[in-house]
Amino acid sequence: MEDHTSGNSTPSSGETAGLTAKMLATRAAAAALSGPAVSPGQWVYRNYVVVATPANAANPVTVKRWATADNGTAAAWIGGQLETGP
């Protein structure tokens, strides 16, 4: 199997079956490093899905927020108001 640790390559169907957590982590790190540099105080939009437990997998919660790249400050709309803080 060839190594696809650089860039954002998509594994072939044969590779997907043998994909390990370590390989996935390596590919994710390589993809993140290939992106633009972000300074610690720069604001970054984050949109992710949270599943608290496997039993809640059918009802994930979507979280949308802004945060500085170093996570020193965050902001989100909560109850119609902009909330900011550490």
Image: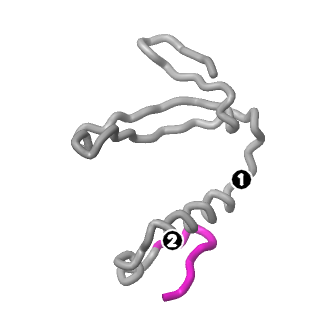
Name the N-terminal-most of marks 1 and 2. Answer: 2
Q: How many marks?
A: 2
Point 70% across, 36% down: residue: 70
Point 60% across, 17% down: residue: 84
Q: Which residue is mark 2?
A: 23
Residue 19, disc: none
Secondary structure type for disc 1: loop
Point 34% across, 34% down: residue: 61
* Direction from residue 1 to residue 14 in the image, left or right: left
Amino acid type, residue under disc 1 in the picture: Pro
Q: Magenta stretch: dominant SS? A: loop
Residue mark closest to the camera, 1 vs 2 = 2
Q: Position of residue 44 (x, y in %)?
A: 63, 37
Q: Which residues are magenta?
A: 1-10
Crowding at label 1, few (<14), some or many (≥20) Cα neighbours within 10 Å? few
Amino acid type, residue under disc 2 in the picture: Met
Q: Which residue is mark 1?
A: 36
Using the rendered view, name the quadrant where residue 16 is placed: bottom left
